[in-house]
Image: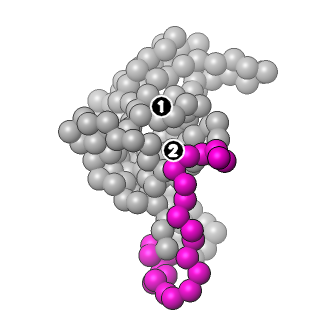
């Protein structure tokens, strides 16, 4: 069984896109107003070989400065890709590889649900087909963590070629 779906608009959370091999990203969205999508997901689960599998869960947020978390009323879905991810802008134009996709970016994710049974583990997995970026929040940069430009050491300009000449 394989099923292709597209999420509602949500916020990117936990992007790990520059990892060799496996790339992961989570998307959170409000379940209110997205009942049709959740019904589609529940139908896919029910029709699979693994009707007890979970493809989404309740999202949680940290309580103040504590180590405790509480539900925040949103849904979170985790996705995976073993290949370069295809990105598109709001007008469906392809975007090159995005390594600076940050928390809070607004996006939709096209994904395929596949059943798997590997080494005693079994269930449903969500593989990324592509990500449509509706609002880009860039990942960590010097400015985003509070630095300002100073006099001193500057990284030499990087060569465009990934190999030594």
> Mark 1 packing: few (<14 Cα in 10 Å), some, or many (20+)?
many
Say above or below: 79 vs 70.
above
**Which residue is the extreme one toward the right?**
119
**Place of residue 153 in the rendered image (x, y in percent of width and height, measured from the top left):** 59, 81
User: Which stretch did the figure color magenta?
Assistant: 143-165
Under tag 2, what secondary structure? strand
- Residue in the foreground of this view, choosing between 55 and 133: 133
Asked whether the viewer can see residue 33, the reply is no
Q: Are marks 2 and 1 in contact (CB under 8 Å)?
A: yes
Asked whether the viewer can see residue 142, the reply is yes
Main SS class of the magenta portion in the image: loop
**Residue at position x 49%, y 22% from top?**
113
Say above or below: 106 vs 69.
above
Q: Which image quadrant for residue 36?
A: top left
Say above or below: 65 vs 74.
below
- Circle 2 is placed at which residue position? 25
- Residue in the foreground of this view, choosing between 106 and 51: 106
**Residue at position x 57%, y 27% from top?**
125
Mark pair 2, 1: CA separation:
9 Å
Within the magenta stretch, is there residue 151?
yes
User: What number of labels is visible?
Assistant: 2
**Place of residue 112 in the rendered image (x, y in percent of width and height, measured from the top left):** 46, 23
Under tag 1, what secondary structure? strand
**Place of residue 120 in the rendered image (x, y in percent of width and height, measured from the top left):** 78, 21
**Which residue is the extreme one toward the front?**
165
**Place of residue 60 in the rendered image (x, y in percent of width and height, measured from the top left):** 51, 56
Q: Which image quadrant for residue 9?
A: top left
**Residue at position x 53%, y 14% from top?**
48
- Circle 1 is placed at which residue position? 128
Left or right side of 103 for 132: left
């Amino acid at each position: 069984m394989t099923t292709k779906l597209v999420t509602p608009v949500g916020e990117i959370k936990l992007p790990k896109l520059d990892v060799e091999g496996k790339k992961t990203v989570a998307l959170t969205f409000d379940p209110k107003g997205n009942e049709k999508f959740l019904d589609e997901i529940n139908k896919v689960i029910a029709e699979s070989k693994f009707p007890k599998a979970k493809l989404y869960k309740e999202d949680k947020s940290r309580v103040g400065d504590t180590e405790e978390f509480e539900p925040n009323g949103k849904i979170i879905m985790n996705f995976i890709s073993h290949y370069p991810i295809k990105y598109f802008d709001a007008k469906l134009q392809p975007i090159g590889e995005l390594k600076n996709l940050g928390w809070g970016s607004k996006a939709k994710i096209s994904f395929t649900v596949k059943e798997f049974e590997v080494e005693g583990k079994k269930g449903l997995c969500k593989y990324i087909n592509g990500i449509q970026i509706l609002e880009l929040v860039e990942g960590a940069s010097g400015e985003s963590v509070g630095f300002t430009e100073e006099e001193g050491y500057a990284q030499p300009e990087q060569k465009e070629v990934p190999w030594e000449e």
